[in-house]
């Protein structure tokens, strides 16, 4: 029996920030206030991520330039990883480099083969300021690297080169949501 609330169950779904918004291309500020507003933001991030059917979401993807992200992501062995990290730092990214399909809730419907390391370690704190260390392999390592990139002002298309980059950006320019920007 579950004795804690489901992440996001008390949160509100926020509007998604889309490619082209400056907040996605600006490094986020460290969190210094560990009060109720941070807990509300984390709940809203979970609610928004689940509503969009994602596996991770950074605060700047809902227009908040704070260093925090949430995740509910399987690894390659289908083990579920669920949590959040405040003020995360990617402290290790190693192993083989794998080019795999990657998408982003800020670029709905667009996917491109993106190179990522097969292992990643992120350190930070939780909503109460307690230290956390999250290790991931495979798809979960990709998620951790992707969300840390967001907080540095990097979108996965920034990592693409050549025809992959051109194709993804062309698709983004033609997407129905691009007209709303």
Image (cartoon, grey):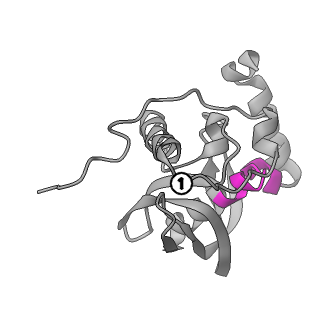
Is 159 left, or right, of 99 in this rendering? right
Label 1: few (<14), some (14–19) or many (≥20) C-alpha neighbours in 10 Å: few
Q: Position of residue 173 (x, y in %)?
A: 80, 27
In magenta, the rendered stretch is: 148-160
Which residue in the protein does label 1 denote? 34
Residue 106, by quadrant, is: top right
Q: Position of residue 150 (x, y in %)?
A: 70, 52
Q: Establish if 161 lies above or below 42.
A: below
Q: Does residue 153 belong to the magenta stretch? A: yes
SS assignment for the magenta stretch, majority: helix
Q: Does residue 96 belong to the magenta stretch? A: no
Quadrant of the snapshot with the C terminus? top right
Residue 97 in sight = no
Q: Establish if 65 lies above or below 82.
A: above
Quadrant of the snapshot with the N terminus? bottom left
Q: How many marks?
A: 1
Q: Residue furthest left?
A: 1
Q: Establish if 7 lies above or below 97.
A: above
18 or 89, which lies in front?
89
Helix, strand or loop status at disc 1: loop
Residue 41 in sight = yes
The residue sitting at 48% across, 50% down in the picture is 55
């Amino acid at each position: 029996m579950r004795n804690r609330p489901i992440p996001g169950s008390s949160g509100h779904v926020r509007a998604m920030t889309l490619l082209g918004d400056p907040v996605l291309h600006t490094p986020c500020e460290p969190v210094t206030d560990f009060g109720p507003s941070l807990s509300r933001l984390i709940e809203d991030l979970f609610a928004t991520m689940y509503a969009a059917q994602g596996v991770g979401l950074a605060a700047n993807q809902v227009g908040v330039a704070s260093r925090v992200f949430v995740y509910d992501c399987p690894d390659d062995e289908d083990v579920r990883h669920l949590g959040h990290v405040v003020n995360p730092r990617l402290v290790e990214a190693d192993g083989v480099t794998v080019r795999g399909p990657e998408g982003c809730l800020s670029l709905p419907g667009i996917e491109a083969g993106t190179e990522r390391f097969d292992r990643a370690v992120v350190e930070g704190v939780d909503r109460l300021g307690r230290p956390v260390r999250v290790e991931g392999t495979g798809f979960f390592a990709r998620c951790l690297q992707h969300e840390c990139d967001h907080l540095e002002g990097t979108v996965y298309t920034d990592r693409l080169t050549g025809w992959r980059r051109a194709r993804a950006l062309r698709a983004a320019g033609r997407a129905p949501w691009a007209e709303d920007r």
